[in-house]
Image (cartoon, rainbow, N blue to C red):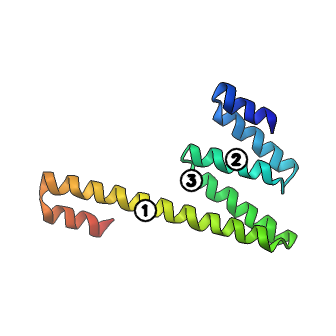
Amino acid sequence: MELARLNVEQFDALDAAVGLLKIVLDEEEGRSDAVVFLSELYEKAHRDEELAELLTQQIASAKSRGDTAAELEFEQAVTSITALVQSTEDATTAIEANRIAEEQGAVAAIRYRIAH
């Protein structure tokens, strides 16, 4: 854990820190401090798919341990991330539709919104 923190804080080596944290979690599956730190790194780097995968794995692990509280916590985190990604995608679509409207007109923008 400390080596992962050092990689981030001293060297801005996010990928190295992620790799180290994955090793920690392979060896100690339920280590919450490693899960939290890895989640923060994924969020900081906008690596939403990897974050969702990590949390999904943690949900499965919590289920197998019978840890209902952890399972719920991770499920809530996945729900929050999903909502954030969806709102980001919606905003991106809206921006692109506005650009199309300016360049090609309202009909083209409406067609774009329907398709996306």
Q: Which residue is mark 2?
A: 38
Point out residue 24 in the picture as x, y percentages from the top left corner: 82, 44
Task: Determine whether label 2 and label 3 are within 8 Å by CB.
Answer: no
Between label 3 and label 1, give the one nearer the viewer.
1
- Disc 3 marks which amino acid? Asp
Point out residue 25 in the picture as x, y percentages from the top left corner: 81, 49
Query: Is disc 2 placed on a helix, strand or loop?
Result: helix
Residue for point 69% across, 63% down: 56
Residue for point 58% across, 55% down: 49
Q: Is residue 60 above or below residue 6?
A: below
- Disc 1 marks which amino acid? Ser
Question: Label 2 vs label 3: CA separation?
Answer: 12 Å
Q: Is residue 17 left or right of residue 111?
A: right
Task: Name which of mark 3 and mark 1 comes first in the sequence.
Answer: 3
Q: Which residue is mark 1?
A: 87
Task: Name which of mark 2 and mark 3 comes first in the sequence.
Answer: 2
Point out residue 12 in the picture as x, y percentages from the top left corner: 63, 29
Query: Is disc 1 placed on a helix, strand or loop?
Result: helix
Check disc 1: other Cα within 10 Å, few if <14, some if 14-19, many if 20+: few
Task: Name which of mark 1 and mark 2 comes first in the sequence.
Answer: 2
In the displayed image of the protein, which residue is found farthest to the top?
11
Q: Is residue 104 left or right of residue 67?
A: left
Question: Label 3 vs label 1: CA separation?
Answer: 13 Å
